[in-house]
Image (tube, rainbow, N blue to C red):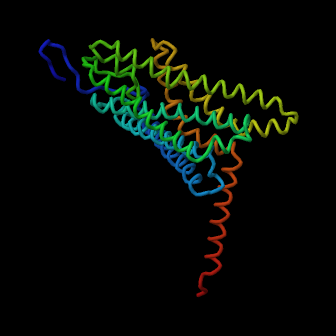
Amino acid sequence: MLMDETNVTIITVVHLLGFQTPKSITFLLFFLFLLIYCATICGNLLIISLVSYSKFLHSPMYFFLSQLSVTDILLATDILPNILHITLEKNTAIISISNCIIQFYFFAVSETSESLLLTVMSYDRYLAICKPLHYTLLMGHRFCWVTIITTWILSFIAGLIYILVISKLEFCGPNIIDHFFCDLDPIVKLSCSDITIVQIESTSTSVVFGFIPVIIIIVSYVYIIVTIFKIPSIKSRRKVFSTCSSHLTVVCMFYGTLLFVYLVPRRGQLLKITKFLSLLYTVVTPLMNPIIYSLKNKDLKEVVGRIANNLLKLHFYHFKNLPVT
């Protein structure tokens, strides 16, 4: 800690308290989070590899899905190694203010990009179901790349705006964050400066990158549902709905937990509840996204089956041609 000229204690490090679980289960928690991290990275890398490898998956929907996997890897890598560190340090870890702000930056970037990608994916499903004759024209290769580049640029700019505003604050404690990562609200509570600009910026960003995407997704699915109900055959309805069921599941899981965590007041026991619920959109969502899309997607299953068959044939061919001794 440092003292400035006005005798205000300026903190340079903070203590992340983590989950405050019994020390007897420290190793179990560490192993569980390590397993989740490895599964998240492998699952999302598998999605990216499959989309890149198979020409059968070279469509806008899978292109956006691969970008969602990149976002999930970024989010998991930003959050989970820090959780592992806190767990090893017996539920408390020291982190500098600058590193805390950097962690929040990448968290903001990944959450913003996920929100925008889910919105783009809902628009893709809207065009595919409601305007199938115009789908190829409207969702062309150039449009997809422009959309993705714009999404990432906006995400990095949104995170940068947060950082520029937060970096101007003075932090005077207490130097304790009762959380497992550096979120905006816990960081701002450490400040002894005027946080009006931060609150205005946070509200504006939430509206632009949170509320508006939700409205677009809702409107898209209203049109999708109306179109599906116009299909006379029940079998055809189910087949069409199955093409967007995975995306709808991910949307509900992502926005549902975000809305609950950030709209419910964080006091007393609710603070502990929201801390554990934060695991859903920071840890569980990146893990579940590839699982949900893989389990409910016949195309991905088919590509995995083809690759597995090719590997088995290759293995059998080498085994068959081994020299006899």
Pick whichever, 261 or 200, lies toward us: 200
> Which quarter shows the C terminus?
bottom right
- Tell me: 125 left or right of 145: right
Question: Where is residue 230 drawn, in percent x and y?
Answer: 83, 30
Q: Residue furthest right?
A: 232
Pick whichever, 135 or 177, lies toward us: 135
- Tell me: 169 left or right of 300: left
- The image quadrant that residue 237 belongs to is top right
**Is residue 151 placed above or below 321 in the rendered structure?**
above
Question: Where is residue 272 drawn, in percent x and y?
Answer: 47, 19
Question: Where is residue 18 drawn, in percent x and y?
Answer: 40, 28
Residue beneath the point at 72% across and 36% down: 131
**Is residue 136 placed above or below 156 in the rendered structure?**
below
- Tell me: 209 left or right of 323: left
Q: Residue furthest bottom?
A: 325
Pick whichever, 20 or 100, lies toward us: 100
**Is residue 312 placed above or below 274 in the rendered structure?**
below
Residue beneath the point at 53% across and 32% down: 116
> Which quarter shows the N terminus?
top left
Residue beneath the point at 62% across and 71% down: 315
Query: Could you tell me how many numbered marks the image carries?
Result: 0
Question: Where is residue 288 drawn, in percent x and y?
Answer: 58, 38
Q: Residue furthest left?
A: 5
